[in-house]
Image (cartoon, helix red, strand yellow):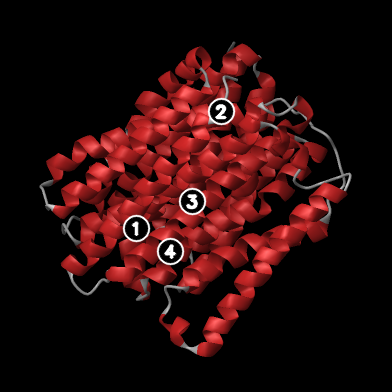
Amino acid sequence: MAKQRWVLGLTALGFFMAMMDSMIVTTASTAIRTDFKISVSSLQWALNAYNIAIAAVLLVGVALGERFGRRRVYELGILIFCLGSIGCALSPNIAILIGARVVAGIGASVMTPMSMAILTQALPANRRGQALGIWSGIGGLALIIGPSLGGWIVTQLTWQWIFWINLPIGLAVVGLSQRHLPESCGQAEPINWLDAWLLIFVSTGLIWALSATTMTAISQPLFLGLVVVIGGLSLVGGGWFIHRQNQTNTPLLPMQLFKTVAFIHGNVATFLLYAAMYGIVFFLPQYLQVSRHATALTAGLELLPWTGTLVLVAPFAGQAVDRWGTRIVALWGLLLQGIGYLLLVGLLVVQTTYVWLIFPLALAGVGLSMGGPALQKAVLGAATSTLLGKAAGVYNVFRLFGGAVGTTLAVIGFSSVGSYQTANRFTAGVLVAFLGAAILSLLGCWSAWQLKRV
């Protein structure tokens, strides 16, 4: 039992660090934008560069873990993540910051899937749902601590310190993992680097083409042509990538996983769940600071009704999944999140005081807390033990790619009517972004309904 606690704790810490690096940037985003004097289109890449790097490299990292050892690659990923964090803290401009975020994302690309695979492999099947719920809850601490800690650091120190705090945690996890985590391998296969680079190009190209639609240069014929070419090539490349996965005996993305309903719809629902969440998390702290004139610390604390529910609800959600199945819990999760965001839009329209925002924020947080563990179990439960690592990788690709797409769509919605020129213009743009996030979450209900009890 003590060994299982060490496994659960150390794997959850890896997820915690990866989530923390996304969330802690949110309340610091206004300070970063002001310091570097950048637009919202450029600012989104402080978040998206990290998520896209993880999504693009993740399956390669998973393949390395399956071949050379999940614990070994997990530890290596944490060390690379720490190096990227140092680069972020020392960045003199947005370009260097984005590059360093890519390095951190490359390291983080294996932290979450390897931690999931190590945990799932080490525990019996009848305890996995509860364990994944606790794993989500501990990782979800980043949602609580991240914005509040980021706000405190920006208020008391400078935004660069949000990255320095990764070092002591990361080094401690690496040291303890060598003693307490079991080593395991999956189906060892050679890595096709053409497929790896193709996946990186496709994922990056699609997100860049989407985000470029918010740039002022889009009105210029040459730039518009570049966007169309890169977007088109990315779509063609995506089709070619899928074709290659069907033809090869050693696919980076095993298409046989997609033969089960639970795996397909579990990942689609995951994509939409986190697309909605990341669209909100990018703009909500900025809204609290720009439109409601909160400090970074106050904005972080005002997110607690939303983020705090993960720690409170996720462990019980895991038990609920074990008892009632993935479909019901995932469906209610996506529905509650969508309703919470819709209520948030309505309250922002009438410009109520902050206290009225607490209920919809908490409702959306409960939905996210329910949906996450349910969809994790649906996806991992549809894979065989030899493909467990890759299944975890695919799940996280959909989660992070969904986050990147959700952030980009939120920026597109915001830019259609909003700007930073006045608080009213900013609020108008935020309303469109939040409405889009609500729609994405509600769309996920259909995929959740397709799940069977697993």
Amino acid type, mark 3: Gly
Is residue 451 found left or right of 152 in the rendered image? right
Residue at mark 3 to residue at mark 4: CA–CA distance: 11 Å
- Amino acid type at circle 2 is Leu
The residue indicated by pointer 2 is 451
Cβ–Cβ under 8 Å for marks 2 and 4: no
- Mark closer to the chain start, 3 or 4: 4
The tag earlier along the polypeptide, 4 or 1, is 1
Q: What residue did someone put label 3 on?
A: 403
Rounded to the nearest angstrom, the CA distance separating label 3 from label 1 is 18 Å
Residue 138 position within the rendered picture, expressed as x and y whole percent measured from the top left: 46, 30
- Other residues around mark 1 within 10 Å, as few (<14) / some (14–19) / many (≥20): many
Of badges 3 and 4, nearer the viewer stands 3
| Left or right placement of residue 433 versus residue 65 in this view | left
Q: Which disc is residue 28 wearing? A: 1
Q: CA distance from mark 2 to mark 3?
A: 22 Å
Query: Disc 3 on helix, strand or loop?
Result: helix
Question: Does the rendering let one see residue 27?
Answer: no
Closer to the N terminus: mark 2 or mark 3?
A: 3
Q: CA distance from mark 1 to mark 2?
A: 38 Å
Question: Observer-nearest residue: 356 or 335?
Answer: 335
- The relative height of residue 103 versus residue 130 in the rendered view (above or below) is below
Image quarter hosting the C terminus: top right
In this orientation, which residue lies closer to the viewer: 295 or 450? 450
Q: Earlier in the sequence, mark 3 or mark 1?
A: 1
Which mark is first along the chain, 4 or 2? Answer: 4
